[in-house]
Image (tube, rainbow, N blue to C red):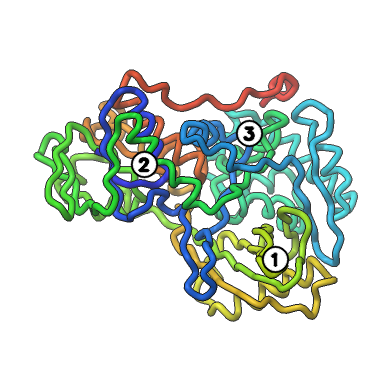
């Protein structure tokens, strides 16, 4: 029995079904996808994603999952990222012919967004990250990325304008809050490991369409999907879990995978079960980090590039979402780590979004959107801070070590579990594959990371 039809739950169910098991996936909603979902905007009738979801070339498990679902063709890959600090000046970052980790060095070295001193500081920081390697990264798991950057002699404006620009988008936390090992992983394996690692994958269809095939694929492999069934509690007999109590009654199972967010899981477990499993006891320690998306529709096109990285703006990204039937254009601005904005009224957020558009595209000044919609994803991700790392639970119960013990047939999955990744879709799928492998010898388990390029490996990565 798998509770939760988000990415972690779908990945668990599909991997188990393909291995010959008989997973039953329970999802409260009528559609699968969890937080990666879409809805019909009542104001316009448009189908809108709850927020922009992207992946990178190093997301090996998420790419594998899309292959298994048969939707890999719905992801468009971009090797060029366009950056701007405003005033219509756009700079493109494209990998060169050089081998990793030097493939991006010429492009970043030419960025006019940063002066010569700033570029030297960035090179100094990147070199330190490269030489640190994976073992050195682990040593920083109990400190913030800002603390790490301080040891690299990074000026405050470089931290704000370069490092934070990337980290906020990748980890949904600023450098002052994010765990250093999470941010270091983004740079080591997302930019330096190989030439494809930094490629950006963007869905070409609404998220509901991306996951619409999942029920048929899971059931075609031998699993069962029961949507519209709400889990109320995990049944526990004092020794093992025995099933799931739902709005339709008790459903017995020989094993349960809880593939739901930590706060949802906290409501499903009894005090007795919590006391029996150390993995469940720190659930109240987890915090969330919000994301805000502002959808704007203009009568005529505003931007030509598919997406734009914003430096020194209120928002972090602009994504081109397509042309309207009347010849206009739909764009989406994204603000990550949006704690300070979450209580702001929609009109204020819309004004900031329009101001950022006018700043990035001077030719659009004076033009106002004909349609707007602000989406607040208050619980978008868990907050991957240094304090929470030690509390991220393993998939399976452990019989040894501090905090050992637990319920042997209760398995946990979700991006907040101990996946080695920050709060990402890749982490969610990895946790699902890990849970499936723990339940069945026939599962391949977690897909290996993309290989590190020879030069990068030689230099210490």
Up-down: is 329 above or below 439?
A: below
Query: At which x and y percent is residue 21?
Result: 28, 26
Which numbered tag is attached to residue 215? 2
Up-down: is 232 above or below 377?
A: above
How packed is label 3: few (under 14 Cα within 10 Å), some, or many (20 or more)?
Answer: many
Observer-nearest of 446 and 321: 321
Query: At which x and y percent is residue 60?
Result: 55, 31
- From the image, which quarter does the C terminus lie in? top right
| 289 to the left or right of 18 | right
Disc 1 and disc 3 in contact, CB within 8 angstroms: no
Residue at which label 1 appears: 329
Number of marks in the rendered image: 3
What's the distance in space between the residues labelled 2 and 1, CA to CA?
A: 33 Å
Q: Please say whether residue 390 is visible from this viewpoint.
A: no
Q: Is label 3 in a helix, a strand or a loop?
A: helix
The quadrant where residue 408 appears: top left
Residue at which label 3 appears: 189
Question: What residue is at 26 percent from the left and 40 percent from the top?
Answer: 278
Query: At which x and y percent is residue 222?
Result: 30, 30
Closer to the chain start, of discs 2 and 1, is 2
| 47 to the left or right of 298 | left
Q: Is label 1 in a helix, a strand or a loop?
A: strand
Which numbered tag is attached to residue 96? none
Q: Is label 2 in a helix, a strand or a loop?
A: helix
What's the distance in space between the residues labelled 3 and 2, CA to CA?
A: 32 Å
The quadrant where residue 9 appears: top left
Question: What residue is at 55 percent from the left and 71 percent from the top?
Answer: 374
Query: At which x and y percent is residue 419?
Result: 45, 36
Closer to the chain start, of discs 3 and 2, is 3
Question: What residue is at 23 percent from the left and 32 percent from the top?
Answer: 405
- Name, please, the residue furthest toward the left: 237
Question: What residue is at 52 percent from the left and 66 percent from the top?
Answer: 339
């Amino acid at each position: 029995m798998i509770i939760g039809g988000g990415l972690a739950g779908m990945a668990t169910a599909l991997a188990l079904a393909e291995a010959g098991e008989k997973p039953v996936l329970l999802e409260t909603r009528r559609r699968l996808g969890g937080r990666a979902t879409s809805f019909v905007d009542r104001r316009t009738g448009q189908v809108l994603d709850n927020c922009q979801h992207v992946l990178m070339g190093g997301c090996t498990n998420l790419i594998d999952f899309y292959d298994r679902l048969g939707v890999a063709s719905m992801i468009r890959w971009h090797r060029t990222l366009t950056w701007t600090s405003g005033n219509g000046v756009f700079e493109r970052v494209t990998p060169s012919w050089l081998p990793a980790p030097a493939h991006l060095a010429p492009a970043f070295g030419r960025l006019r967004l940063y002066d010569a001193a700033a570029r030297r500081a960035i090179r100094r920081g990147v070199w330190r990250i490269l030489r640190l390697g994976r073992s050195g990264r682990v040593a920083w798991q109990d400190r913030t990325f800002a603390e790490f950057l301080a040891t690299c002699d990074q000026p405050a404006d470089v931290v704000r304008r370069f490092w934070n620009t990337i980290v906020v988008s990748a980890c949904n936390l600023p450098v002052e809050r994010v765990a250093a090992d999470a941010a270091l992983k983004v740079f080591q394996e997302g930019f330096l490991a190989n030439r494809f690692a930094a490629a950006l994958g963007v869905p070409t269809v609404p998220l509901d369409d991306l996951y619409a095939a999942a029920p048929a694929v899971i059931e075609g492999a031998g699993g069962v999907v029961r949507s519209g069934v709400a889990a109320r509690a995990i049944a526990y007999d004092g020794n093992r879990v025995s099933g799931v109590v739902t709005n339709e009654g008790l459903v017995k199972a020989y094993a349960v995978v809880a593939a739901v967010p930590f706060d949802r899981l906290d409501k499903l477990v009894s005090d007795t079960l919590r006391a029996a499993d150390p993995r469940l006891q720190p659930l109240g320690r987890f915090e969330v980090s919000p994301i805000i998306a502002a959808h704007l529709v203009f009568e005529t096109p505003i931007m030509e590039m598919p997406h734009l990285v914003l430096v020194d703006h209120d928002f972090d990204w602009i994504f081109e979402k397509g042309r309207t039937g009347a010849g206009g254009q739909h764009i989406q601005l994204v603000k990550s780590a949006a704690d300070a904005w979450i209580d702001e009224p929609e009109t204020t957020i819309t004004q900031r979004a329009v101001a950022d558009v006018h700043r990035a595209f001077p030719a659009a000044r004076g033009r106002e959107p004909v349609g707007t919609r602000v989406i607040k994803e208050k619980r978008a991700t868990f907050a991957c801070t240094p304090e929470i790392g030690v509390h991220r639970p393993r998939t399976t119960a452990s019989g040894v070590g501090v905090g050992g013990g637990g319920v042997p047939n209760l398995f946990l999955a979700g991006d907040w579990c101990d996946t080695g990744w920050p709060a990402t879709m890749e982490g969610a799928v990895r946790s699902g594959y890990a849970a499936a492998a723990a339940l069945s010898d026939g599962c391949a388990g977690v897909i290996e990371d993309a290989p590190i390029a020879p030069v990068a490996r030689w230099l210490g990565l």
